[in-house]
Every structure is written in C-alpha cells, then in structure tokens.
Image (tube, helix red, strand yellow):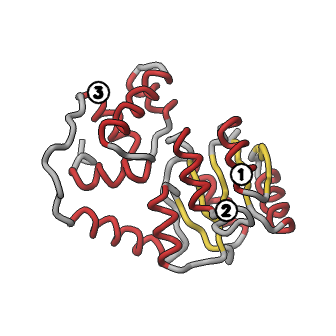
Amino acid sequence: MTRVLVVDDHPMWREGVARDLTEAGYEVIAAVGEGRQALRIGRSLEPDVVVLDLQLGDMSGVDVIRGLLATHADMRVLMLSASAEHQDVLEAVKAGALGYLVKTAGRDEFLEAVRRTAEGDAVFTAGLAGLVLGEYRRLAAAPATTDDTPRLTERETEVLRLVAKGLSYRQIAERLVLSHRTVQNHVQNTLRKLQLHNRAELVRYVIERGLEAD
C-alpha cells in the first residue's frame, strides 16, 4: 500500500484530500497543516508520496521540499497548489517536486496524479509540462562553466541514471542486485561529489551530460 503524507494549511481541503486518498486505497500516514510538522513526520516515517501545498502558514512548500529531500533524496513530492504561476511551478520543480497539480483538478485526475507520482512519473496540470520541459532544455543548452567535474565510477553513473528515471532506492537495489544501503551510499557519494542536493538537480545533471541514454 502506498503511504502518503498530506500537507495543507486549509483544514477542510486537507481533510477532503486525505479522505479521497483513503477511499482510493492509499494509507494516509498523516495530514498536517504546517511545514515544520511535515518535516518531522516526513523524515521519521518516510512516506512514499508527499502531497504538498505551496503556501503554508509557517514556511513555504518549496522550503519543505528542500528539507525533506536533504535527508531522503528519493522521496516523491506532488505539489497541489492554487497557484499556476510559472515562477511558482519552476521553483517547486527545481527544489525537487516530481509533479505539480493545480487545485482545480478533479478527484479522478488528482488520484491518477498520486498513482503516477508514486511510480516515479512526472505529472503536471495541462499546460505546465511544456513550461518545465522548456526550462530544462534551456538549462541543458547553457554552456558549461567548468571542465573539472568530478569523475563518477561506472556503478555511480549506473545508479544515477536509474535515480533520474524515477526509480526508488528499493527498485534500484532489486534491478542491480544490491542492498538498499549500498544504493543509498552510492547516491549520497554522487550528490557529494557533484555538489548537488536532491533528485531534481540529479535529473538536470543527467540531461546536461547526456547520460539519460543507456
């Protein structure tokens, strides 16, 4: 059963989202209204998916994403926000959100987005996917600023490609016949070598270096 953490500072909306998820067969481990609560629960219980609002009372959703992914880089975050402003979308994705859904989405669209997010797919409200793809292409086309990029081992590169494709640590471990801890160590070593912080930055690195092709 997919475990979900719901974070939204509007009680009626938060309760409605949690109820829809539970009725659809998801395990809602908590439904909270503050970013600091989300960080504590997310770090300790490690949900598969975090459904997160952009604007919270105590901190921004973008800061929550960064805080969660700093300790659990494979956590999957689906933004569920009232804002469709391009800057808000790009900031959330750059921070590490896997998808971005506007709150005008219907129940079925929302549940499908959660399902796909849990599987590692990037999910966006219609019209926003092109925006994000265009930004990644722009970044990929930008000239490199340095040629002294640290060298990755063959195994680190292999793990990096799979992380960028959206596989969880557990899925990568099964595919490469490694332990979960070994995969975690490879990812943390790669992040440290490349001076990156989360999954979104890893994906950007893979695109820029043309590593997505097997």
* Distance from the alpha carbon under mark 2 to that under mark 1: 8 Å
Q: Which mark is residue 36?
A: 1
Relative to 138, residue 160 above or below:
above
- The 10 Å Cα crowd at callout 1, few under 14, some 14 to 19, many 20 or more, is some
2 or 3: tag closer to the N-terminus: 2
Q: Could you tell me the amino acid type at mark 3?
A: Arg
> In this view of the protein, which residue sits in the foreground, 143 or 77?
143
Secondary structure under tag 2 reads loop
For image coordinates 37% across by 47% down, the residue present is 202
Q: Quadrant of residue 35?
A: bottom right
Q: Amino acid at mark 1?
A: Arg
Closest to the observer, 127 or 55: 55
Contact? badges 2 and 1 (CB < 8 Å): yes
Task: Specify the farthest residue to the front.
Answer: 58
- The residue under label 3 is 155
**Distance (Cα) linking label 2 and label 3:** 38 Å
Q: Which residue is mark 2?
A: 59
Dot 2 crowding, Cα within 10 Å, few <14, some 14–19, many 20+: few
Q: In this rendering, is residue 153 above or below 80? A: above
* Residue 117, horizontal then vertical, whole percent: 56, 53
2 or 1: tag closer to the N-terminus: 1
